[in-house]
Amino acid sequence: MTPLNSQKGSFTHQHVRCAATLHQPRDAGASPCPTILIVHGWGATQLTLVTNYITAFNNAGFCVVTFDYPSWGDSEGLPRNVISPWQREKVVESALAYTKSLPEVDATNIILWGSSFGGGHVVRIAAEHPELRGAIAQVPMLDGLLAVNAVPLTRMLRFGVDILRDLLNPFGTRYVPIISEAGGYSSMDRDGAWRVEEWIRANLKQQNDNRVAARSLATMAFYRPLKYLRSIQIPTLIIGATRDTVAPFNEAKIRQASSDAVEIHTIDANHFDPYLDPWFEENIRRQLEFAIGLLHAANK
């Protein structure tokens, strides 16, 4: 299911076609509009958990661009469902260039929006693009080492076996489930992760490709975009969840590491709560106030 007034497109990243979609306000006129570029998280595709965000931003006058990473969703690329955070950052650069090229987009008023793993990517890209209007990162993965330390030892050992079986098998890809019910074997079983599967079935009316290449897990501990917070020059809103065990949010450490351009707020929630009611209302209200405020400040 694609929201109304959406146009499918694509861009090329390292010779791979990546699916993208432009979501416009219903009353979009001929003039280019300020735009939110959505950068998805770990195992998400274009619409996973974000249809309400798209609607809210559209209703506030923003265009929204979504995309699928190579080997995910409607994008090309083999093997399927592989994650490298450093490669994904490069994909975000390509997605940003594509967004700027769209005639419907006001290239001087682009705001990056990222969640979870994508929130970490947004921090890195925001630090390198002072021309952007701003950035928003919710429940961001800022320190992969903290996330790894939260995983029980027995689970880590099983991950290690699957990672080795994936890396050493030249004939195929070893997959693990992206999410599972609490206590199940997957890359994420904490913080009510299974609600994502239920949300996809209820809202997108489709079956989720619930698998990630095991080799992807080996990258987590080494991905620490926290170190780029000090370099951010554009207004950036970070919203952390106080009870997040998927991307643990050490507020004191993050504040200490951030530049003056970074605004930090917290929600009393776990990792997946902010996407859903009743937490969503407070979350999106704060994000809209921030995004609209950036436009007002630019127009003064």
Image: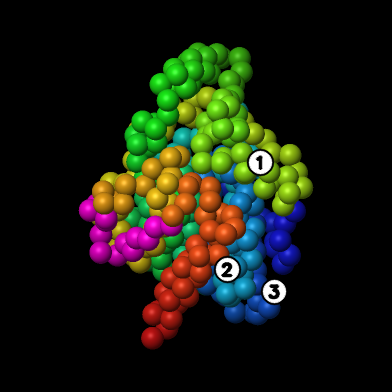
Of the numbered discs 2 and 3, the one sitting upstream in the chain is: 3
Residue at screen point 50% across, 65% down: 282
Residue 265 part of the magenta-drawn span: yes
Q: Amino acid at mark 2?
A: Phe
Residue at screen point 36% across, 31% down: 149
Q: Position of residue 117 (x, y in %)?
A: 46, 44
Indicate whether 136 appears above or below 77: below
Residue that mark 2 sits on:
57
Q: Name the element at disc 1.
A: helix
Residue that mark 1 sits on:
197
Residue at screen point 30% across, 58% down: 232
Q: Name the element at disc 2.
A: helix
- Spatial CA span between label 1 and label 2: 24 Å
Q: Name the element at disc 3.
A: loop
- Magenta segment range? 255-267
Of the numbered discs 1 and 2, the one sitting upstream in the chain is: 2
